[in-house]
Image: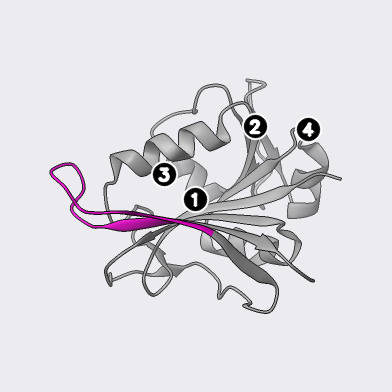
Amino acid sequence: MKQIILIAAIGENRELGKNNDLLWHLPDDFKRFKTLTQEHDMIMGYRTFRSLPKLLPNRKHIVISSKKLTSDTDQLVYCGSLEEALNYSKTNPTFVIGGGQIYSLSLAIADKLELTRVHGSFDAEVFFPEIPKNEFELVKSEFHAKDDKHAYSFTYETYIRTSR
């Protein structure tokens, strides 16, 4: 069975972004994202895909879009639904990388959450869904203080599904 992992950086109030952009710049979180998703398929919404600076190396980008789009590279495929995207994905695990609507759709089938909790409150228009406490357990937490490269302190949090 394919493992589905939601990966996101969120504020204290589950903030994700505004104006199709992140609310912070955390180089160590980018490195962690790269390490975890490398060589795996990533499912995302169209707006999240458009916010990427380019196709990320060594990962397949599976973009959910209601528009009929085609790609000229095998590193990018467009799908019309989450179900189609999951069927297309070949890697185990498969990562869901955003945005808010895609996280909301996929939370019910997620096996694991890899979150970076950014310590602060932010003005946002997109939010991560509420994590059902009776379905997920926090199994790992690693705090990082702010420093000269990180304007905010943050904590890596790993949750695993305990029930559906």
Rounded to the nearest angstrom, the CA distance separating label 1 from label 2 is 20 Å
Percent x, y of residue 126: 43, 67
Is 37 left, or right, of 141 in this rendering? Answer: right
Mark before the other along the chain sequence, 4 or 3: 3
Instruction: Say few, some or many: other residues with alpha carbon within 10 Å of mark 4 (under 14 / 14 to 19 / 20 or more).
Output: few
In this rendering, is residue 25 above or below 163? above
Instruction: Say few, some or many: other residues with alpha carbon within 10 Å of mark 1 (under 14 / 14 to 19 / 20 or more).
Output: some
Q: Which residue is mark 4?
A: 90
Answer whether labels 1 and 3 touch (C-beta < 8 Å).
yes
Image: magenta residue range: 140-156
Mark before the other along the chain sequence, 1 or 2: 2
Q: Which mark is residue 51?
A: 3
Mark before the other along the chain sequence, 1 or 4: 1
Q: Is residue 146 visible?
A: yes
Percent x, y of residue 43: 64, 44
> Which residue: 72% across, 56% down?
111
**Does the magenta segment cover residue 86?**
no
Q: Name the secondary structure under disc 1.
A: helix
Rounded to the nearest angstrom, the CA distance separating label 1 from label 3 is 6 Å
Mark before the other along the chain sequence, 2 or 3: 2
Task: Looking at the picture, tell me which residue is in the foreground, 48 or 113.
Answer: 113
In this rendering, is residue 39 above or below 104? above
Select label 2 or label 3 by which is in front. Answer: 2
| Residue extending furthest toward the left | 148
Q: Give the residue type at disc 3.
A: Ser
Q: Which mark is residue 47?
A: 1
Q: Give the residue type at disc 1.
A: Arg
Q: Name the secondary structure under disc 4.
A: loop
In this rendering, is residue 32 above or below 114? above
Task: Looking at the picture, tell me which residue is in the foreground, 39 or 98.
Answer: 39
Is 94 left, or right, of 113 in this rendering? Answer: right
